[in-house]
Image: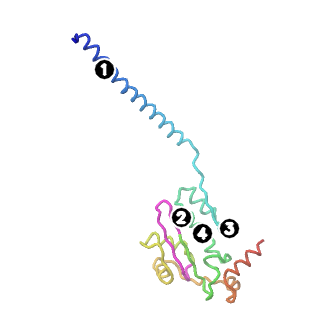
Amino acid sequence: MKFSRRDFIATTAAAIGSAAIPVELEAQQKKAEDQKRATTMQAADTKPAKRPVIICAENGFNYLGRGYKVLSEGGDTLDAVMQVIRGPEDDPEDDSVGLGGLPNEDGVVELDSCCMHGPTRRAGSVAGVRDIKNVSLLAKAVMEHTGHVMLVGEGAKKFAVAHGFPVENLLTDRSRKNYTPDRPFFEVRRDRSLDRL
């Protein structure tokens, strides 16, 4: 079978034309995807920003405004939480933690705390700490300044003193009156919670 020059040119043109169609379709699809992506990004920019949310125990309710202020100004989530937690720790009328906390069986306020920082996935904690009021900040300091996750007892207290935490007697007259050495701690807490009902 012989091909003329005219047949060769026609066949070649058809082949080139058919090869160009997928390239052109691919370019159109890419352009459509780029437009869709740009529209999605534009829509994301116009969505209202999510409002910060803080959840706390009942004794932190009065301090939520401090934490919310940190979040709404773009502050770190853990710093916002610390603003809320420090409220009950500093309040001598709150006997759950910190200054005025209920003592252990030896009549000594002994505290534990832990914290986790979501963005960095780091954690710090302290346990059995005496004479240090803001153990939440101490747990954060363990996270930030050591390679440890937990310090306990005297070691935690030494670390606190080395980092400028004041040493103070946390037992107040109020918490001393609520302390009864012959009644276990959980009975004191249960009686108080029933009084609220």
Of 3 and 119, the residue lying toward us: 3
Using the numbered discs, state the Cα–Cα distance from disc 1 to disc 4 in whole angstroms: 74 Å
Amino acid under label 4?
Ile
Q: Main secondary structure of the magenta part?
A: strand
Residue labelled with disc 3 = 58
Q: Which mark sits nearer the N-terminus, 4 or 3?
A: 3
Q: Which mark sits nearer the N-terminus, 2 or 3?
A: 3
Q: Is residue 92 left or right of residue 151?
A: right
Residue labelled with disc 4 = 85
Give the total of numbered labels: 4
Q: Residues within 10 Å of mark 1 (few under 14, many from 20)?
A: few
Residue labelled with disc 1 = 15
Using the numbered discs, state the Cα–Cα distance from disc 2 to disc 3 in whole angstroms: 19 Å
Of 159 and 150, the residue lying toward us: 150
Using the numbered discs, state the Cα–Cα distance from disc 1 to disc 2 in whole angstroms: 67 Å
Q: Quadrant of residue 130?
A: bottom right
Which colouring convention does the figure follow? Answer: rainbow
Give the magenta part as a residue range.
115-132
Using the numbered discs, state the Cα–Cα distance from disc 4 to disc 3 in whole angstroms: 11 Å
**Rendering coords of residue 190 (x, y %):** 71, 77
Amino acid under label 2?
Asp
Q: Which mark sits nearer the N-terminus, 1 or 4?
A: 1
Q: Nearer the viewer, mark 3 or mark 1?
A: 1
Residue labelled with disc 2 = 79
Q: Which residue is pictured at 65% across the width and 83% down the height? A: 172
